[in-house]
Amino acid sequence: MEYSKTNDALGVVNRGNVCESGLCTLCRADCQGKCETWLSSMIGRKLLYPRDFGTVTAGSKNVSSTDVSYSSLRIQGYNYGAYGLPKGLSNSADDCIFPNVSLETEFGNEVKTKSRVPLMTGALGSTFIAAKYWDSFAIGAALVGYPIVIGENVVGVDKEAVIEKGVIKKAPELDRRIEKFLKYYDGYGAIIVQMNVEDTRNGVAEYVIGKFGDKVVIELKWGQGAKDIGGEIQVANLEYAQFLKNRGYVVDPDPMSSEVQAAFKSGAIKSFARHSRLGYTNLDSVEEVRADFMNAVAGLRKMGYKRISLKTGAYGMKALAMAIKFASDAKLDLLTIDGAGGGTGMSPWNMMESWGVPNILLHAKAYEYATILSKKQKVVDLAFAGGLAKEDQIFKALAIGAPFTKLICMGRSLMVPAFLGSNIEGVIKPANKMLLNGNWNELPKSVTDIGNSPESIFAGYYDIEKKIGKDEMKNIPFGAVAAWTLADKLAAGLQQLMAGARKFNVNEISRDDIFSMNRETEKETNVPYITDVDDDEAKKLLK
């Protein structure tokens, strides 16, 4: 399906080809606007409505769809009732208003982790863009109160880290990332540290539990939706490539080869790709994978971890069932299921385009398998990921996996405000430009049309100031202010959709709140076709 580059009603436009999420296929840190997510990071919930109120009327063009995707689901509305009202409220018209919808959720087995909104970030690991903008990512997540994931290989690529025989003696970049979140953590959200093969070998779990204790959730990784291979970064420095090779990574082409070195010096080779290894390559059966997985979880519990999660990718049905079953057997706290269509810092492009199970199909099957398993045992809490960015997508993904889905994992969309805020701050505070990785020399018209100061640009500025105080605001990067503003827009939009469905608590969202726009989607997801929903009851009423 081709997604439109422009939305005249909202006054937004995409620079490049458009993904289902509404983001450009290639999202640039120096972008001057203005997709929906980009503009929402400044004007917030104002973008829930058509522009130029008072001089326009607007009508929807997206009323039908023939593909099988989240776009081919629609949200059900009801004309009576109210469910899940927060304590102390009545079902009066005065209390049943969308600002009273509670978006708070929690996940976990024995230890519950709270989140103010049903969102979490994707894994922000060893890619340089994650390191550059981490302060905005982490502080924004902590202020709003949603979980953020430190992805794989952060210690391994850190030149300042000291690793001796599988024991980490020093890990300054990992420390910085954890501490930056914890500084503003107020009991909502979480800092999750992900581990792959190399991280396990390097002793990341032992280091984290020793230094940070139960403040951190540890995550095992099976895969992701963007690619069917280990994590990758690209480096343009021969000495750094050799350092990564010596640290145990697969580096391509081989920086130790004299021929490669000569080609690099001549300019024929300009960069190297660092790859992580695939897991479970020495195992041949489901039983062996289960035994290895359960041993890994037992080892983490023995170290002292009280909260453990698993991230799996867009594999087929057998692997999906294994993830749900094994995570439930191990009494994990969260399982993130990442469908194809998600984003990445670096992946082989044609792999991204052609591998794996698309998000809606994977999520629909996850619900089916979780339902089967729930008849025998408690099912692990789920998070769904894979190219989701807008409030309607959040609602649909929560609904298609209800009641098992507690969070929607969003990658690139929660990174956009960090890029935007850093660019704005780099212009307004030139001394911070290099520190913040700002890319602009002046504010573009797409920003100055809104304002010229942080107070006039970001709709959420004063809300944060109220939360932390005027003196502390000077320490908050504009990228974090933009993250708050985007989260506020997503939250308000989700509250409105939920109020229309008469659901005033996230836990009340169910599959009854969505329907399919075409028979293909109905067949693949088991979400009923629009006019079949309540059709029998309607006819009974007429008779």
Image (cartoon, grey):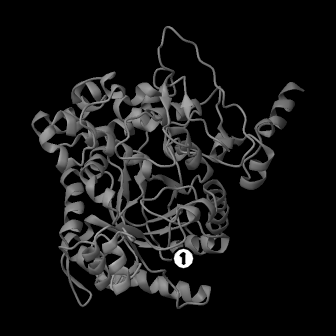
Residue 434 in the image: state x and y as whole percent: 18, 48
State the image quarter where residue 535 is shown: top right
Position of residue 168 relative to residue 233, above or below, is below
Residue 306 in the image: state x and y as whole percent: 34, 71
Label 1 sits on what residue type? Phe
Q: Quadrant of the N terminus?
A: top right
State whether residue 90 appears in this view: no
- 82 vs 259, left or right, is right
Q: Which residue is mark 1?
A: 326
Residue 132 or 304: which is nearer the viewer? Answer: 132
Which residue shows up at 34% across the image and 31% down it?
42
- Per the image, label 1 sits on a secondary structure element best described as helix
Residue 431 or 79: which is nearer the viewer? Answer: 431
Residue 422 or 111: which is nearer the viewer? Answer: 422
Which residue shows up at 37% across the image and 27% down it?
446
State the image quarter where residue 264 is shown: bottom left
State whether residue 242 appears in this view: yes
Which residue shows up at 63% across the image and 58% down it?
358
